[in-house]
Image (tube, rainbow, N blue to C red):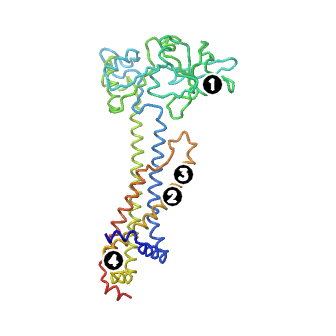
Amino acid sequence: MSSFRVLFDRDTWQEIFGSISNNKTRTVITIIGVLWGVFIYIALSGSAKGLDNGFERMFQDIAMNSMFVWAQSTSIPYEGFKIGRPIGLKLSDVEYLRKQVPEIQFIAPRHNRGVFGSSSVTVKRKNQSNNYNLYGDFPEFTKIATKRIFDNGRFINDQDILNARKVAVIGEQTAEELFEQGEDPVGEYIQIDNIYFQVIGVHKYVPGGGFEQAGDIFIPFETFRKLYNTGDSVGWFSIAAYDHVDVVQVEEDILLALKRKHRVSPKDNRAFGSFNLGEAFHQIMGFANGMTLISLIVGIATLLAGIIGIGNISLISVKERTKEIGIRRALGATPGEVKVQIIIENIFLTLLAGAMGLVLGAGVLSIINIATQSLEDFPYTNPTVPLIYLFGVVVLMVLLSTLIGLIPAQRAVNIRPIDALREE
């Protein structure tokens, strides 16, 4: 119990503060190492978290396990078909893929005009006209890639598909170029290739969403079919797998299923094209996690070096205070009380330096956050340190400073009072 009383003894803290004030230069040198270690830990881990948050923001409007699949032409002869046979995706492929690949959560057939080498469409309203990209979509597409629609509008629904309605969701750029400032486009009409469409919503453009642009227009898939006489053909599929499955394996299963249905050689890797956004996302997040791990290792290593420095300084301090320690022992101080005082001084200096490093690191992260707030195209936002990291560094500082402090504390205990009193 006497050892614990030392912690709350006023004389103990007076001696600690007296030692610090009498050796200001040594104290400053002691805390610099830990301060720098905590600063590196906070700055690096916070910066890595900002990168992690930036990547999550970039992909927040699209399913993590999503991919795109399209048809090309064969490169291997198969079942009597020659090389170069063009392949076309069909609406019937949707149900076929659902049965063959149960790991598919959502699948949305899509058509387009204006991207992938096709010509854009001419859109008019009153005396204004311009060319824009046009997409034919199903409502299920928004379960794969979220569309942010302004409050008074909506996206395409099932009734629009069923009745092949001439309705359109326009981009905010389209609204700015075709409508007067302050005019509400919802409910108004525009002409798409000389066909009137009613505007049912305006979508907000989100940078980083792939090849889509701020002026894109979306109409029901069935309406697109009739307008451009595409029949049962499909431009490409947007697909999202369930979160718990291997997205790379799902991609391989989808391509093999399409090859079977369209009588393509299983070894033909050019008949169908695909882009696995889920795989790319996992690779990016792996990079971000790697950066976080590296920052933690560097920060902890620097922190450990600083705490070892405090231990070395404590050893010197014990040697300088040999006579003082001997007097305390002669007056009745137990070995436990002497040991606890040395360890408390070690922990106090470590936590003091750590608090200073924490404040300095938080200040730097705040400056970085202010400087990067306007960078919408750069994957970086809100560089903060998770609370678990802060709690971990405090526990680590106390633990390491205690362990390192045991060395000078034990040396102090080993000093015999009679020898200490003879020390000059």
Tell us which disc is closer to us: 3 or 1. 3
Neighbour class for label 2 at 10 Å: few (<14), some, many (≥20)? Answer: some
Q: Position of residue 337 (x, y in %)?
A: 34, 74
Q: Quadrant of residue 286?
A: top left
Q: Position of residue 242 (x, y in %)?
A: 36, 29
The residue carrying mark 1 is 175
Say above or below: 63 vs 306.
above
Given the image, on which type of amino acid does mark 2 rest? Val
The residue carrying mark 4 is 412
Q: Residue at x 37, y 28 (%)?
A: 241
Instruction: Calculate the distance from the C-alpha at mark 1 to the C-alpha at mark 2.
Output: 47 Å
Tell us which disc is closer to us: 3 or 4. 4
Instruction: Calculate the distance from the C-alpha at mark 3 to the C-alpha at mark 1.
Output: 37 Å
Instruction: Calculate the distance from the C-alpha at mark 4 to the C-alpha at mark 2.
Output: 34 Å
Looking at the image, tell me whether mark 4 or mark 2 is earlier in sequence order: 2
The residue carrying mark 3 is 366
Looking at the image, tell me whether mark 1 or mark 2 is earlier in sequence order: 1
Secondary structure under tag 4 reads helix
